[in-house]
Every structure is written in C-alpha cells, then in structure tokens.
Image (cartoon, rainbow, N blue to C red):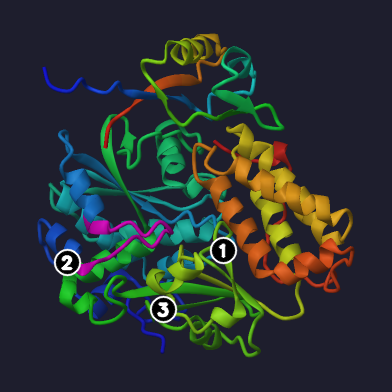
Amino acid sequence: MSLHRVLTGAPRSAPATYAEHVAQFGELPRTADITKELLASGLTGHGGAAFPTGKKVELLKNQRHGVQFVVVNAMEGEPASMKDRVLLSTNPHLVIDGAVALANTLDADQVIICVPRDRPQLAAIVQRAIEERPSRARRDARIELQTPPGRYVAGEESALVHWLNDKETLPQYRPTRPAILTIGRSATLVDNAETCAHVALIARYGAPWFRQVGTANRPGTAVVTVSGAVKPAVTEVPYGTPIIDIARECGVTNPPQAFLLAGFGGVWIDGAEAHRGFDDDSLRPIKATTGAGIVVALPLNACGIRETARIVRWMAGESARQCGPCAFGLPALADDLELLASGRRAEQTLSRLQSRASVIEGRGACRHPDGVVRLVRSALEVFAADVVRHANGNPCVHAQSTVVHVPATQREEELEWQ
Amino acid sequence: MAMRKRGASFRLVVDPVRCDGYGHCHELAPELVTLDEWGYPIITANAFPGNDRELMRSAQLAVRGCPRMALVIEKISAQ
C-alpha cells in the first residue's frame, strides 16, 4: 500500500548522512537543465496549491534577468502536517539535491532552506546536512539555512519572500498572479521541501519512472499526514490511493464520520466519500483537494461544528492582521461557530455565519481568509444534520471531547513577525 | 470607417493591506463602494464603462480621497 520513494529508509533513528544518502540514491547527476524532464513528469507542487513544477520553472527561466535564488519552503506552519519535518529528518540531502538541481536548471546562485525557528532541532539537522555536502564546484549554488518565525502564514510564499527581503513575515498584496516573487530585484523560485525531494528523484530516474505510479493527472506519490482519531502519522502513498486505505494504514480502525482534507484551510468531506482516491480529480466533485497531503479523521464521537470552531478560532489568531476582512472577519466567524455549537440563538447565527463567509471571501491580500471560508462552508454542508440539531437549540452532545490537534492560540502581543 | 471601437471598461480595486477602513471611498463613491460590518470597503460594481462620466468621476474622487492611497482605477483588459 504505502510506497516509499522520498521517504526511502524511513523510519530512521537519525537523519541520513551524505554518505548514506549517496549509497542509497547515488550522486545527483550533473545535468544542467531538467526543465523538460520536470514538464514530462507531471510533478505538481506539494505545498498545497499543486501548481505544475515544470511550468513554474519554465516561467522563471523566461525572466529577462535570470533567477538568483531557489527557496526551499519547509516552514510547514500547518498544524495538521508533519510531512516536511519527517522528510528532512529522514534524509535532508534528498531535499537539498532537489533544490540544487533546480538551481542548476535556472543557473541560480543561491539555495535558501527555510525552517521555522521554533523547531531548532530540525534547523540543526539541515545545518549539519549543509555542512556535510561535498565542497562545491565554483559555479554551483551556495546553500544556506534561514529560520523565519514559525507562524501559519509565514510559509505563504509571498510572506516567506517578504521575510527574506525585509525580515517581516507578512503576506504581500499581489493583484496579478502568478506574480514573480523577487528577493532584492532577483526573481526567486519557491518550492515546498517535499516537491524538492521529488525533483531530486526525477533528476536521477527520469519522468517515465516518476509516472509509473499515481494517476494520469497526478502522477507520483504524496507524503500524507494522518491525524485526528489516531496519533499523527506520516506515510507515503501513490496519488489515487483510497482515502480510507490511507487512514487504515495509519491505524484508523472505526470508519470516521468525516475527514478534513488538505489542511486547516481545506474542506471537510463526509465519511461516506472515503472510498474516493486521494488525488484532485477524484476529489473535485466534492470540492476537495489534496492540499499539503493532510487527512484528519473525525471519529463518530466528535462534533464537526465544534472542531471547526476550534480550528477557525486558531486561524483567526494566525491572521497577520493586515487586511480588515481577515483581521475582524475571522474572529467573527469563530464567534458564530461557537454560538452554533452551543445551541444558543443558533438560527440567526447560522444565517449570519453564511452571509459573513460570503462577505469575507476574496478580500484578503493572501488566501488565508479564503481557506477559512472554504472550511466553514464545507462544515455547514457535511455536518448539516448537526447544524439543524444545534439550530433547534440542542447543544452538542460531544461537547467534552476534542479531536483535532489545534495549538494554543497565542495572544496578539505574543505574536512574533520579525 | 468601420465599426467604432467599444469603450474600455474599468474597475475600482482596493489594496487590502493598505486599507485601514476609513470609509471615505464609500462616502465619495456610494454607487461603487459599500462597507462591510467592520467598515471595510466592498466594491459593488465589478466593471463600469469608461465613457460613463459620472461613475468615472466618483471613482476618481474615491481614489483621491483615500487617506491610505489604497485605491486604484484599473483598466480591464479585453480577454
């Protein structure tokens, strides 16, 4: 069932050394340009947006002044995800190889690996790996580690690049997408850490090998974090593997009532849809995506509305508070959901929640508020029966148990942005 | 001469990061901007024709009246 490609060798007691890495995969071939191979492989980004990696590289290659930076995004601010952490602590060199292959392709001077500063052990693993790399030829890219603050939006690519520029981890307003991100005046490629690991394998084994598993539109494998009803676990599976099988593999035994897919800005799907494959084509009819490879199983003895309220409250706290509709709108959505779960004044609350969701959507500089709106809408659909029950004045019977791991909300003055 | 070119369309665009919810845009261009419950602008007209003098005038007033310079008039390129 599971198929370890980028997770080859996992679980390991210690991260692979460079010698162990080369013994496993061989040296990174010194191909100058792997754009064609990336395009043929059909690899899409594993950070959530699933943008075709080859297309992104091609777009950047056509920049008049060239690309100077390749940024590896291992910020993983998503509380329901552990994949990038697991990947880097299994074999940091695979991720670095991918970034180097991308830098070679774009003739970039520098690779910057970004790990949140509240994970010092992970940063140490990456730093050690960088120091372990064999001395580079003159024209190879320099590799360095950066540790921005570990906020949810810090991993949003414009916020990440903003931090690298000005040490402020705030999303930027980009009216025309896809805008080219720049550090200083140099075009910059930002790719998720797992994406880089897949690139490293494509550079070695080629596109036909990559396409041997997965679906036609989403070839290859995905590293998936399963949590909720079970202790968080990470597995690697071909795209298209049924969601229920992924959940079972990670120890989910009783059929869950629902699943949260993609992340905290993702969507709930009904437990009855669990036979669907974990790939965007199979999930499109139910408006879900694979996102950053996240499956949260919600057991029967939990309240979906209450869980959603907890998530939205946390997401509201993680707003960068730059845009009014996000700064004020998200706490309002959380208030409404909490009222709804408590069964008080639920009917007015429901209609207000729906109209607020529509008002907020699309009015932030980044997609943070849109993700929350998407989550709220899916909760109202999937947990419609609970909504009606609560709206009739019946508070949640499962009010005691909480399932989704939501970090403690920090007070506004504690938040670190610089 | 052949057919006259149709006039271009325009829209008002808010930079949500700059905007601090002063609400002047709504005062100056109520036919283009409403406010949400927190006082932040919602652009109601997706597009207005460039030859509509009144709307263009309102849009320009809103742009100039914004203390945060958060508004621009954007030409909608024909797709």
Residue A43 drawn in magenta: yes
State the residue position of label 3.
A236
Q: Circle 2 — which element? A: helix
User: Are the residues flagged by discs 1 and 2 from a single subunit?
Assistant: yes
What secondary structure prevails in the magenta region? loop
The chain to which mark 3 is attached is A
Q: Position of residue A120 (x, y in %)?
A: 53, 56
Q: Position of residue A258 (x, y in %)?
A: 63, 75
The N terminus of chain A: image quadrant: bottom left
The chain to which mark 2 is attached is A
Locate residue A363: give its quadrant.
Answer: top right
Q: Residues within 10 Å of mark 3 (few under 14, many from 20)?
A: many
Compared with A417, A394 (above or below) is below
* Circles 1 and 3 in contact, beta carbons < 8 Å: no
Q: CA distance from mark 3 to mark 2?
A: 22 Å
Q: Circle 3 — which element? A: strand
Numbered badge on residue A267: 1
Compared with A272, A133 (above or below) is above
Q: Position of residue A114 (x, y in %)?
A: 42, 50
- The stretch of residues the image draws in magenta is A41-54
The answer to whether residue A288 is left or right of residue A3 is: right
Q: Residue at x 88, y 53 (%)?
A: A345
Locate residue A101: give its quadrant.
Answer: bottom left
Which is closer to the viewer, label 1 or label 3?
Answer: 1
Question: Which tag, 3 or 2, sits closer to the chain's start?
Answer: 2
The chain to which mark 1 is attached is A
- Give the amino acid type for the residue marked by disc 3 in the picture: Glu
Residue A315 drawn in magenta: no
The C terminus of chain A: image quadrant: top right
State the residue position of label 2.
A40
- Give the amino acid type for the residue marked by disc 1 in the picture: Val
Question: Which tag, 1 or 3, sits closer to the chain's start?
Answer: 3
